[in-house]
Image: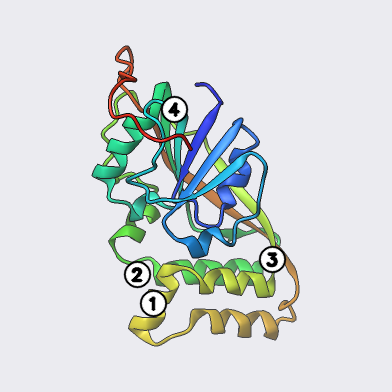
Amino acid sequence: MNTGIVWDAGCGSGQASEHLVRYFSQVVAADKSAEQLRLARPHPRILYKCAPSEESGLKTGSVDCVCAFMAAHWFNLDKFYCEARRIAAPGGVIALFCYGEPFVTGDQVASDFLEDIASKIIAFGGPAIQRMRGGYRDLPFPFSNELQMPRMYAQRELDGEELVHYFRSRASVIDYRQRTGADLCLELEKRLTAHGRRHATYRVTWPLAGRIAPAHPVGKPLALAQQPGLNP
């Protein structure tokens, strides 16, 4: 795979885009939410665009990788896959990533409660979140020669306030509160405070899962003349 241009579809505030720029010459990061894009940090090799995942506006055959991180479960997949095939260069790949449930090591209080939260929210969040929770194993993925995804993890240090804020933003936690009336984040705050751990720093680890495959059948490169698009 070439490492020229990657399209980060559904980029949100650009968290994954900032990592992709380490491996690609240019990142075209697109999201349909202008509000999310305003939160992104500028970078000389990241071009942020307000565009839906189904209509990138990029030239046919112009990108080496189509990537979506924590976003594909919200897409109209038929249209997204059609667009991905159109803009992917010969030899380009499509890669969809998502987080698994986070865990904390070295702090039993936080670790136990994160496991408790995970067990309570497992059935919440709706069909899209369930696809993500399953590591995209049941996500329609009509690409041949699928590659085995290596075992990977994301890590970040969060203090107690940031840990609570992270959980408060999760769709499954919000759905749980709306349907049961119970505020798991308030319980987390109380437990951390009771153990004097409200302002402690935690190393949080998220296992990564996803699907990776060549965007075009091997030996059948894209005809670059079809469906011309716009330069980024």
Amino acid residing under circle 4: Ser
Q: Is residue 156 above or below residue 43?
A: below
Instruction: Check disc 4 and report its element: helix, strand or loop.
Output: loop
Tell me: residue 45, above or below residue 182: above
Q: Residue at label 4?
A: 62
Q: Residues within 10 Å of mark 2 (few under 14, many from 20)?
A: some
The mark nearer the N terminus, 2 or 3, is: 3
Task: Quote the CA–CA distance across marks 4 and 3.
Answer: 47 Å
Determine crowd level at label 1: few under 14, some 14-19, many 20+ residues with C-alpha closer than 10 A.
many
Q: Position of residue 156 (x, y in %)?
A: 67, 56
Which of discs 1 and 4 lies nearer the camera? The answer is 4
The residue drawn where x is 43% and y is 25% is 92
**Observer-nearest residue: 160 or 47?**
47
- Given residues 28 and 209, the one toward you in this image is 28
Residues at marks 1 and 4, CA–CA distance in whole angstroms: 42 Å
**For marks 1 and 4 on the same chain, the one whose residue lies earlier in the sequence:** 4
Considering the numbered disc 2 on the image, is that residue within a helix, a strand or a loop? loop
